[in-house]
Amino acid sequence: MVRKQSSMASSPAVAATRAAARAAESLGLDMSSGLFLCGPGAEPRPHVPTLLGPLAAEGMTALRDRLLAGYPRDHGVTLVYVPTRGAPRVHSLVLADVVEQTAGTTRAFLYLPPLSGADSEANFTALVGIMARLRGPGGCPWDREQSHQSLRKYLLEECYEALEALDSGDARKLAEELGDLLLQIVFHAQIAHESGAFTMDDVARGISAKLVRRHPHVFGDAHVASAGEVYARWEDLKRRERADGKSLLDSVPKSMPALAYSQEVQARAARTGFDWDDVQGVLAKVEEEVREFREARDKGEQESELGDIFTALVNIARWLGFDSETALRQANERFYQRFTTMERLCRERGLDFAGLPMERKEALWQEAKRILGHTPS
């Protein structure tokens, strides 16, 4: 009896999968070759061929309206009706025409071809237009009162959120955060356009010209044998573009996070030969800076020597091919996970974490590390 109930419970899902396979086959689609098969509630992926279903007749209009946020109204789609018996029926139309009546009593699936390059360009143009509308007469009061300076903190926040999404490995989250970052770029371009400084077209034209100029091995007659040679040529082109008398370090933004700034300026200095012969010299420098920190006579000297220790540690990261910002972010995440695990253990055991002696806290720390499976540190 248990096996029979399990079989009955799984049959709707099995039937839906078989119907989806029949729908895909009727369209000449290969379900094993990049086709995104999902239910109607899934997040759409406009640049991937997508088969949605099975669809409920009463939810078609709501589904269409949700899809219109990512696809143009005239995007060609295909409805496939898969009866229990007989061949599937195929109906081609544009997305805007998908309404309740287009779904019947049989299983229905909606196929959305991926957006073309022209569609992508239209989406970007729409984004620029939306921002102009928000900033224009009758637009959003908050958007209209913003300036380059007032948006500065949001630009920085979106950069960090995009990095966090990148580190998480969540592609959908990354796409969302890159969209938020793109919004900030379009926002600043619109403000500049209103003052006559530059436009979004100027921004795109400038970076396109720079990419072409700095890739003569792709867009010109130059030849390179390796990625290392590409990098060397890139740096040489940047050097030629730099104004006379300008330092190699001048183009590194001083508003960068301190670790990232330190690693970049040290890397640039190293390209001129200002560097240690090997990593042992860098390690010896760290020991020297720690000794000088211990010998510091006051808070001012201690702070200065501490900065030198950080600089030397960043240089170790550069020598070993690590990104110091990433290494520290990962260490911060490990600390967060371990500490919050300690707090949880205390709550479960009715303990007051703050009131525990340090040896008990250290024991909890080691227990948290074992639970999380992190390497000792």
Image (spheres, rainbow, N blue to C red):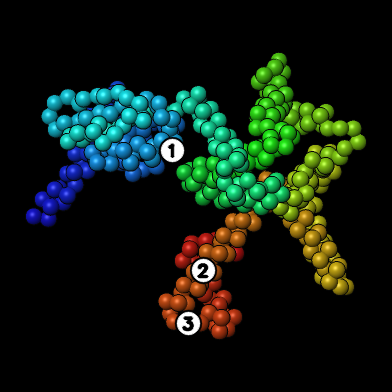
Q: Which mark is residue 340?
A: 2
Q: Amino acid at mark 2?
A: Thr
Which is more N-terminal, label 3 or label 2? Answer: 2
Quarter holding the N terminus is bottom left
Residue wearing tag 1: 69
Label 3: which residue? Answer: 351
**Front-most of residues 29 and 143:** 143
Report crowding for label 1: few under 14, some 14 to 19, many 20 or more residues within 10 A (C-alpha): few
Q: Nearer the viewer, residue 14 or 306?
A: 14
Specify the quadrant that holds the C terminus: bottom right
Residue 173 point in image, percent of width and height: 49, 46
- The alpha-carbon separation of the residues under discs 2 and 1 comes to 39 Å
Image coordinates for residue 78, horizontal then vertical, percent: 31, 26
Q: Vertically, is 348 above or below 138? A: below
Residue at image position (86%, 40%) is 247
On residue 155, which mark appears?
A: none
Q: Is residue 39 left or right of residue 81?
A: right
